[in-house]
C-alpha cells in the first residue's frame, strides 16, 4: 500500500478543550518541531494516520505531509499518544526531517525464529521491543530482525549482541536485556502440589477433662 500524504492545517488555539473539539471533528491535534524552527501546532486527519500506522510495523515512521502555508514536508512520526482504554489516537508529535542531518529515533526489534529453549519447554520473555539510535534519515528502517533460534533455556540476548550496522549509533545501554528464555514453571508447580497433597491434616485433640 502506498501511504496517503497527510494534509496538515495549522491551528492557533491550544489547550485541552480545543484538542477535544478537534478530535470530535475527526481530526487529530499535533505539533511539528525541528530544523531550528519554531514549533507549529497543527491538526490532521486521524483516520488517514490510523491507516498509515496500521500498515506498518512501528509507529516510528518517516512520512510525507502537506502543511498549510509550507507545502510538502518529510517528517518523522516521533510519538503517538493513545487513549489508555479505547486506544484511539489523542495526539501526535512530528519532527522535520533534514537530509544529511542525523536524527534520534526508535527502531522496532522484531524477534524471528523459534528459540531452542522454547521448543524444550521454556518461556520467551520479550523485554525490550525497540531501541533508541541515531542515524541519517536515508538509513532509517522501521524494524530490525533479531534471530533467536539458538537461544537455550537460561540464555538471554543483550543489546550488545545485536548485529547492528555501523550507520546506527546506539543510544541505549549495551547490557540491557532484549529477551530471555526462562525455565519451565511446571516442575515448581507440581512440587508445590505434591507437597500439599502429601501433608497430613492437623489433628485437634479434645482437651482432657479436669
Image (cartoon, rainbow, N blue to C red):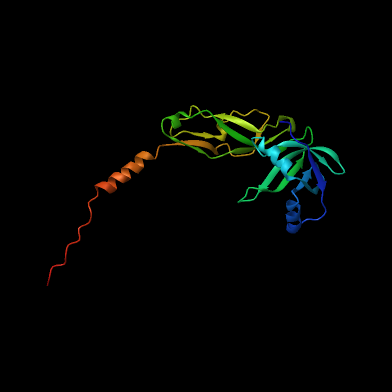
Measured along the vertical axis of the image, is residue 104 above or below residue 17?
A: above
List x then y, in percent, for residue 174: 57, 36
The answer to whether residue 60 is seen in the rendering is: no
Q: Quadrant of the C terminus?
A: bottom left
Would residue 190 appear left or right of 75 to someone viewing this image? left
Most foreground residue, 39 or 110: 110
Furthest residue toward right: 69
List x then y, in percent, for residue 106: 66, 38
Tell me which residue sits at (43%, 34%) in the image: 122
The answer to whether residue 129 is seen in the rendering is: yes
List x then y, in percent, for residue 151: 48, 30
Q: Quadrant of the N terminus?
A: top right
Report the number of discs: 0
Furthest residue toward bottom: 210
Most foreground residue, 195 or 48: 48
Would residue 89 appear left or right of 6 to someone viewing this image? left
Most foreground residue, 50 or 60: 50
List x then y, in percent, for residue 79: 69, 44
Furthest residue toward front: 25
Would residue 77 appear left or right of 119 to someone viewing this image? right
Tell me which residue sits at (28%, 46%) in the image: 195
Tell me which residue sits at (31%, 45%) in the image: 193
Most foreground residue, 25 or 117: 25
Residue 119 occupies which quadrant of the picture?
Answer: top left
Amino acid at each position: 500500500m502506498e501511504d496517503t500524504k497527510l494534509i496538515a492545517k495549522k491551528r492557533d488555539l491550544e489547550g485541552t478543550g480545543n484538542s477535544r473539539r478537534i478530535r470530535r471533528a475527526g481530526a487529530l491535534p499535533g505539533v511539528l518541531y525541528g530544523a531550528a524552527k519554531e514549533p507549529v501546532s497543527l491538526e490532521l486527519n486521524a483516520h488517514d494516520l490510523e491507516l498509515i500506522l496500521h500498515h506498518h510495523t512501528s509507529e516510528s515512521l518517516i512520512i510525507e505531509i502537506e502543511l498549510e502555508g509550507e507545502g510538502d514536508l518529510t517528517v518523522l512520526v516521533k510519538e503517538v499518544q493513545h487513549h489508555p482504554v479505547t486506544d484511539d489516537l489523542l495526539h501526535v508529535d512530528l519532527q522535520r526531517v533534514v537530509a544529511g542531518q542525523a536524527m534520534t529515533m526508535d527502531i522496532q526489534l522484531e524477534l524471528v525464529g523459534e528459540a531452542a529453549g522454547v521448543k524444550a519447554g521454556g518461556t520467551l520473555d520479550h523485554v525490550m521491543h525497540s531501541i533508541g539510535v541515531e542515524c541519517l534519515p536515508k538509513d532509517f528502517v522501521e524494524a530490525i530482525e533479531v534471530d533467536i533460534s539458538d537461544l537455550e533455556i537460561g540464555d538471554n540476548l543483550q543489546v550488545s549482541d545485536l548485529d547492528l550496522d555501523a550507520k546506527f549509533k546506539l543510544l541505549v545501554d549495551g547490557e540491557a536485556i532484549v529477551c530471555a528464555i526462562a525455565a519451565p514453571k511446571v516442575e515448581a508447580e507440581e512440587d508445590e502440589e505434591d507437597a500439599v497433597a502429601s501433608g497430613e491434616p492437623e489433628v485437634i485433640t479434645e482437651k482432657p477433662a479436669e
